[in-house]
Image: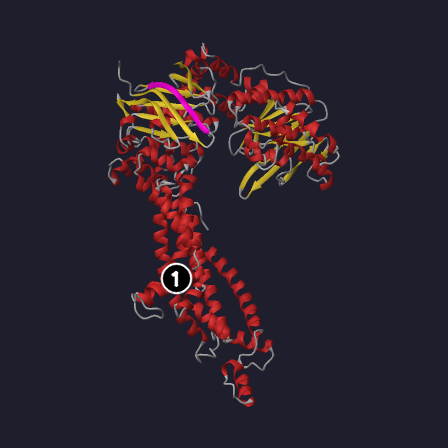
Amino acid sequence: MAKHLLEVRDLSVEFHTAAGTVQAVQNVSWHLDRGETLAILGESGSGKSVSASAVMNLIDMPPGRITNGQILLNGQDMLAMGAEQRRRINGAKIAMIFQDPLAHLNPVYSVGWQIAEMVTTHGGSRGRARARALELLRRVGIPEPEAAMFRYPHQFSGGQRQRLMIAMALACKPDILIADEPTTALDVTVQAQVLELLEELQAETGMGILIITHDLGVVAEIADRVVVMNGGRIVETGRAAEVYANPQNAYTRKLIDAAPGKGAMPEERDRSDQPLLRAEGLEKHYGAFHALKGVDLTIMPGETVAVVGESGSGKSTLARAILRLDDPDAGKVLYRGNDLMTMPPRELFGLRRDLQMVFQDPTQSLNPRMTVFQLISEAWVIHRDILPRARWKDRVAELLTKVGLRPEHAARYPHQFSGGQRQRIAIARALAMEPKLIVCDEAVSALDVSIQAQVIQLLDGLRREFGLSYLFIAHDLPVVRDFADRVVVMRQGRVVEEGPVRRIFESPRDPYTQALLAASLDPDPAVQAARRIAREALETIPA
Amino acid sequence: MQSFIGKRALASAVSLVGLVILVFFLSRLTGDPTNLYLPLDATTEMREQFRELHGFNDPLVVQFGRYVGDLVRGDFGDSIRQARPAMEVVLQAFGWTLRLAVITMTLVAIAAVVIGSLAAFRVGGIFDRIATFFSLIGASAPDFWIAIVAIVVFAVNLHWLPTSGTGTALHWVLPVAVLFIRPFGLILQVVRGSMISVLSSAYVKTARAKGVRARPIIFVHALRNAMLPVITVIGDQAAAILNGAVVIETIFGFPGIGKLMIDSILLRDFSVVLAAIMVSALAIFVMNLLIDLAYAALDPRIRY
C-alpha cells in the first residue's frame, strides 16, 4: 500500500463527562496527499473537528481518550510517539488555523513576535525568525508590513487577522495545513480572498490542506475530495464534484437539499398601498464613525425586506434605529403614517408590541434563569391587554406547537434545548405580542444548514398565516434569495441598490452588489468552477 | 496619558479635601485631650493654659480655619505627644510601613504567581491539591493568632528570633512572615483561577498547535493575560498593609503608621491623625495609579 502524507485509520475518540461517556468519533479513516485539498464536511456535533484535534494532540486527556486507531504521518504512527516528538511536529510539519482569529491570536503580543515565535520555537534564530515574519506578512498581503510587525491583533480587520494566522501557520513551511472553519466568521468578499490565498500558497508550496467546514460552498470552491460526517461517523467520501452530483447517503442528500439559494424567487408584488413602515433619511453617528448616512426604507404589509451588507455596513444599526432601540441622530420612521421619533412615550409603548425582534444568538437573547413559559408569557405581563391570565397556559402551548415545539417544553429552561430550538423559542416569544413586523437580525446565521432551512420555512409559514412583515438583516445571500421579496444592499452606511429579489440576483446594477454576488459561494462545485474561470478571466483583462 | 493622570489627581484631591474636613470635625467630637496629657494633680490654671496654648478654647470653626491656613503654608501642625512637627512623625512611621509592605508584597507576588500558575497547569494534580490546601488555610487563618503563636514558638521557646521591635534583619522575619500568609493564600487562589480560564483560551490552543513548549505556554502566553485580575488584588492587599497593618504592628511593636495612628487616636493627637490620614490617602492614590499604569503596560488594548 502506498504511503500517504497523512493518514487516519479507524480512529475512535470518546469523552468522559459528568453526563456519561460520549463517543465523539467512531472508526474514522481518511487520508491526505501532497498538494491536495481534503474537506471534512459536517454540522455541529458531527465530530468533524475531532480527528484534526487528535492529529494536533489538542485533545485534553482526560476527559478525552483515544480508544482505537492510528494516525500515520509519512507512514509513522504519531499515537505511538512521545509528547516531545509530537510537539516538534506541531507547527513544523503540520500547522493549523482556526475559525475565530481574534480569539486565537494572543491579544497582548505583537503579531510580528507571534509569527517569529513559530520559527524560534522550532530552532530558528531570532534574526531569521524576524526576517521570515516580515516576508510572510508581505506575502499574505498585509499593508505596511514593517509597521504591522509591531501592531497587536485587535488593530487588524477580521480578514487581515485570518491572513496573520495563515502567515504564522506557514512560517516553518509545513507539509500539511489544517484549517478549521477558516472563513466562517468572515464577510463573503473577504472569504473569497482568503480561500484564494490558501489556493495560491498551496500551489507555491505543494502542501496538503485539510479544511474542516459546515459550508457546502467552501467545499465546492476549494476541495478536491470530501469526507461527510454525521454523528461521529463518516457517512460518505469521494471527489467533491461526484459527491455533490450523485450523493449516495441519505444524510448527504439531505444536507445538499437543505443548502439555500436554489428555490424559485417570488414575483414582484404591487407596492402601491399604504406602507406598513417607512424610514426616511436616517442618520446615526457613533463618535466619529458615521454609521448611517441618510437611509430610506419601505416595508409593505406582508412583505419580507432583506437588508444585506458586510460587517460595518450599518445594517444592524438600521434595524436598531427603526425600533428606536438606538435613537437615530436624524430622520423619520413612519409606522402606518405616525412618526415613531416624535411619538410620546405612552403611545410608543403601545406600538412596541407591533414591532418585535429576533436576535442572532438565542443563547444570549433568552434569559437562562427563566423557563420557556416565563419567557413567552412575559409579553403579557408587560402588555396587560393582550390576554387574560387564565388563558396564558393554553396560549403558550399553542405558540410552542406553532413553532414546532411541544407544549410540555414550557416548563424547561433554554439550556435544555439545541440552538435551532432556542431560536424557535425566541420566535414564539416575538409572536406572543401578535406583532405586525418582526425584525430578524441575522436570525438564522448561527444555525446549521438543515436547521436554518427549517427555521426559514417556519418564518415563511407564519408570514402566510398571520400576514406578518419581516425586516430580515443578513449577510448570507443564498438565504436571502430564498426568503426575501425585496433586497436592500448596504455599504458603508448607504443603500447602494434596492429592488425586487429577482432583479437584484439576476441583473444587479451596482458594482458592489455584483462583487457580493460573485464572491458568494454556490454549493455546486460545477457552478463554482465556472465562476472561478469567469473571475480569473475578469482579472486578466487589463484595466 | 498625562491628561489621564491629571484627571485622576484632580478627582483624588477633591476626595482628600472632603476627607480632611470629615476627620477634623469627627476627631474633635472625641473630646478634649487636655486631661490625657496633664497629670491628675494639675491645677485649673495649668489646664487652662494648655488649652490656650493648643487653641482648644476657640470655636471649632475658628480652629478649622486656622488649621486650613497652616495647611496652605505647608504646616501640618505639631504632635502634642512628641512636641515636633506632625508630618515629620508620620513620615518616619510611614517609611517603616512602606518598607514592610514592599518586602512582604514582593515575596507574596512572586510566590503566589509561580505556585498558582503551576497549580493551574495540572488542575486536580498533587501539586494543585497541596497548593490549594495551604492557600485556603492561609487565606482564612486569623493573623493575630498566628502572630502570637509565632512569637511563643520562635522567640520565647526557641530563641531563634527577637519578639518585637526593629534593629536587625532578624527583627523583620516574623512580621513579614505573618503578614505574608493571608495575601499569599488569597492571591494564589486568584492566580490559579485566572490561569485556569486563560489556559483554556483559544490563543493557548494556538500556542499548542504551534508546538510551543509547556513552560513558555504558561509563563509567556498565559501569564501576562492572567495577570490583570491578579494585579488588582495585589494592589488591594498592598494598600491594606500601607493603610496600617494595625494588629501586626501592635503585636510586634513595629513603629509603623498603623501603630502610630492607633496611639494618636487614643491620645487625641489630632494633627498626627490628620497628617497620617492624608499620607495614607496619598499612598492609596499612587497605588491605584500604578495599578492602572500596569494594566496599560500589560495589555496593549488598554490605552488612556
Name the residue beneath numbered marker 1.
B101
Quadrant of the rendered image containing residue A538:
top left
Q: Is residue A279 above or below residue B123?
A: above
Taking the magenta stretch, the answer to whether it contains residue B236 is: no
Report the front residue among B108 and A142.
Answer: B108
Number of numbered discs overlaid on the protein picture: 1
Way the structure is coloured: secondary structure
Chain of the residue under label 1: B
**Residue A285 x %, y %:** 57, 41
Asked whether residue A386 is in view, the answer is: no
Quadrant of the image containing the N terminus of chain B: bottom left
**Residue A248 x %, y %:** 45, 10
Q: Is residue A270 left or right of residue A192?
A: right
Quadrant of the rendered image containing residue B290:
bottom left
**Residue B236 x %, y %:** 45, 56
Q: Is residue A220 above or below residue B161?
A: above
Does dot 1 land on a helix, a strand or a loop? helix
The amino acid on which the numbered mark 1 sits, given as a three-letter code, is Ala
The magenta segment: A20-31
Report the front residue among A263 and B259.
Answer: B259
Q: Is residue A167 left or right of residue A486?
A: left
Asked whether residue A519 is in view, the answer is: yes
Residue found at the far front of this picture? B157
